[in-house]
Image: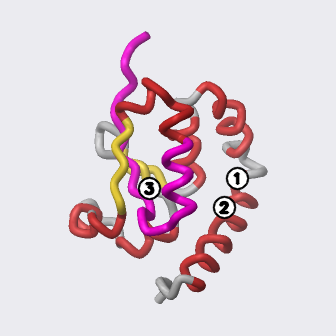
C-alpha cells in the first residue's frame, strides 16, 4: 500500500470533545493516521494568519491542509479526513452528498457556536 500524502489538521485543542474525537480518529486510523499532523488552533494562530485563515474561523470550523497547501474547511475537511479510515469511508461518502452537506453544515455551525458561547470563547 502506498503512503498517503500528509495532512495538517487545525482543530480546537481546548475542546475536550475535539480531543476525544482526535484520539478516536488516531485509534481507528492506525498506520494510515501517521501522516495526519494535528495542530491546535490556539497554538498555531500565526501559521493560520500566514495562510490567510482567521484563527477565530478555524475555531468555528475544522480546517485541513493538504500536501500542496490547499485548505479544505467544514464538511469537506471532515470528508477528506474520514476517507483515510476504512470504517469511516461510508460515512464520508454520506456526509459529502450534495443534498445532505448544507444541512449538516448548518447543524454543525450551530453546535460549534453554542459550545464556544458556553465556554466564553465566542466573540
> Which x, y percent locates residue 18?
52, 59
Distance in Å between CA atoms under marks 2 and 1: 6 Å
Query: Do tag 2 and tag 1 residues touch (Cβ < 8 Å)?
Result: yes
Q: Nearer the viewer, residue 23 or 52?
A: 23
* Above or below 69: residue 90: above
Q: Which span is picked out in magenta?
A: 1-24
> Which x, y percent locates residue 78?
56, 47
Looking at marks 3 and 1 on the same chain, the residue that comes earlier in the sequence is marked by: 3
Helix, strand or loop for disc 2: helix
Quadrant in the rendering for residue 10: bottom left
Residue at 58 percent across and 42 percent down: it is 79
Quadrant in the rendering for residue 103: bottom right
- In the image: residue 76, left or right of residue 7: right
Q: Residue furthest top?
A: 1
Residue at 66 percent across and 71 percent down: it is 111
Q: Nearer the viewer, residue 123 or 74?
A: 123
Distance in Å between CA atoms under marks 2 and 3: 13 Å
* Above or below 100: residue 68: above
Residue marked by disc 2: 105
Amino acid at each position: 500500500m502506498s503512503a498517503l500524502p500528509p495532512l495538517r489538521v487545525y482543530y480546537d485543542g481546548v475542546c475536550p470533545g475535539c480531543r476525544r474525537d482526535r484520539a478516536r480518529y488516531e485509534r481507528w486510523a492506525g498506520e494510515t493516521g501517521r501522516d495526519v499532523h494535528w495542530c491546535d488552533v490556539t497554538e498555531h494562530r500565526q501559521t493560520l494568519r500566514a495562510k490567510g485563515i482567521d484563527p477565530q474561523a478555524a475555531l468555528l470550523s475544522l480546517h485541513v491542509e493538504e500536501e500542496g497547501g490547499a485548505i479544505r474547511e467544514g464538511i469537506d475537511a471532515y470528508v477528506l479526513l474520514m476517507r483515510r479510515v476504512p470504517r469511516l469511508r461510508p460515512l464520508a461518502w454520506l456526509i459529502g452528498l450534495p443534498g445532505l452537506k448544507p444541512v449538516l453544515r448548518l447543524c454543525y455551525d450551530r453546535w460549534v457556536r453554542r459550545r464556544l458561547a458556553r465556554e466564553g470563547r465566542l466573540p
